[in-house]
Image (cartoon, rainbow, N blue to C red):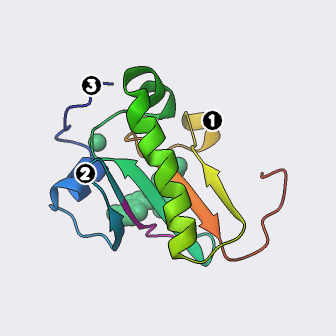
Amino acid sequence: MTGEPQDDCLFCKIVAGQIPATIVRETDTTVAFRDINPQAPTHVLVIPKAHYRDAAALAAGAPELAADVLRETRAIADQEKLDSYRTIFNTGTGAGQTVWHTHAHVLGGRGLEWPPG
Ligand code: AMP
Ligand code: ZN
């Protein structure tokens, strides 16, 4: 939970431009790009440029940055013309987190069941 770039982090490499991604929005503090394995017609990941391992670490270490990420999820929904959408932070292995640089999934463009699996 450092905020510093990590050499072994996939999403830090996307922020640095070392790995390609389909970037759909960028701000001073965040990047949003299409998920490589989309689960809905719109499936965009919003990340802080700074490295925090999960949403809990981000909220504790940089709450203003957590707000930036959340604000960007709405901007993505507007850009994608979504009235309804779901914002998800998988936190921990048991919840399905596989990339340890916090990211908000923005899903929409189809009906979304509740509760999720
Ligand atoms: P999570 O399982 O919540 O940690 O989400 C990680 C997400 O990152 C998954 O939905 C993956 O499909 C996605 N992903 C992994 N590698 C890439 C990549 N290189 N570009 C875009 N999305 C990726
Ligand atoms: Zn990272």
**Dot 3 amino acid type:** Thr
Q: Which mark is residue 94?
A: 1
Residue at the spot 50% in from the left edge and 27% down from the top edge = 56
Residue at the spot 45% in from the left edge and 34% down from the top edge = 54
Q: How far apart are marks 2 and 1 (CA)?
A: 32 Å
Q: How far apart are marks 3 and 1 (CA)?
A: 23 Å
Q: Residue 2 carries which label?
A: 3
Q: In this view, does 102 lie above or below 25?
A: above
Q: Are marks 3 and 1 in contact (CB under 8 Å)?
A: no
Mark 3 against mark 1, which lies toward the viewer?
3
Query: How far from the left and from the top, in percent, is residue 18?
Result: 15, 61
Magenta span = 32-37
Residue at the spot 55% in from the left edge and 59% down from the top edge = 74
Name the N-terminal-most of marks 3 and 2. 3
Query: How far from the left and from the top, in percent, is residue 87?
Result: 62, 53
Q: Distance between the residues labelled 3 and 2?
A: 18 Å
